[in-house]
Image (cartoon, rainbow, N blue to C red):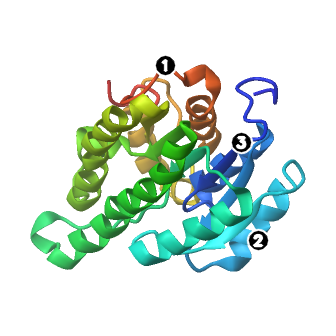
Amino acid sequence: MSDAAFSLKDRVALVTGGSRGIGAAIARELAHAGAQVIVNYRSNEKLAQKVLDELREFSPKSSAMAFDIANPQEVDEAFKSLLERYHKLDVLVCNAGVSRDALLPRSTPEHFEEVFRTNFFGTVNSVRAASRSMMKNRYGRIICIGSVVGEMGNKGQSAYSASKSALFGFCKSVARELSSRQITCNVVSPGFIETEMTQELANEVKQAYLDSIPLGRFGLASDVARSVRFLASEEAGYITGSNLSVNGGLWM
């Protein structure tokens, strides 16, 4: 995508879980679009710094911030520091997430609590904190990363599926609540995305997954990142409360 398309020049964007995988791809895409990007990470400073070094080639004022989105106090303190430095937040991408997969009879309450604490309540903490400054500025783009599993379910992923499905109702409510301040809130739901994990799958397992995808390939992190860039842009100003499925037709 050219840097001129869906420009984010002079915008300030925070990407939670931005130090690797889809989050890092989103951070790069937003920086390419002209945004000053804050890369959130929880503990791996080395990984976050590597991403930040890449971003600063395009966005010299980008930075990295360590905080746990599941901790409301840490989130509030981080947003205070962010606003002191950048004076505004235009775009929030809630990407950080965890999964604890297990068949339901073997799962534990702790599995569900851990997954919801990050995937759902961590998103709530981040959106709540961001909404305060966005409302004052009467502008904002909130984009939450869901999952095709939140749409269709999957064996062994009841906790993860439920936590991602919960984002749909939450984001629709946020969209209605904040729309009068020109703040949009949408979900992007990736399907099977090419990762180190998919590369290590046995050929027959990989083929079984591919056979279920009408477009015949795994998605790329860049497919998700470009979708986020669009929703973060001025051109997407009339889209809110929506779920954008980026899954190659796996679920329609």
Q: Secondary structure at mark 3?
A: loop
User: Can you say whether 3 is above or below 158 in the image?
Assistant: above
Report the side of 228 relative to 191 (left or right).
Answer: right
Q: Is residue 88 left or right of residue 59?
A: left
The label shown at residue 238 is 1
Q: Secondary structure at mark 2?
A: helix
Cα separation between marks 3 and 2: 21 Å
Instruction: Kindly give the residue lying farthest to the front in the view shown.
Output: 136
Q: Position of residue 216 (x, y in %)?
A: 50, 28
Across and down, in percent, residue 92 comes to 55, 49
Indicate the amino acid at tag 1.
Tyr
Name the residue rendered at 49%, 24% in the picture. Answer: 215
Disc nearer the start of the sequence (3/1)? 3
Q: Residues within 10 Å of mark 1 (few under 14, many from 20)?
A: few
Of the two numbered discs 1 and 2 in the rendering, the one whose residue sits closer to the viewer: 1
Residue under label 3: 11
Q: Which kind of residue does numbered mark 2 sit on?
A: Gln
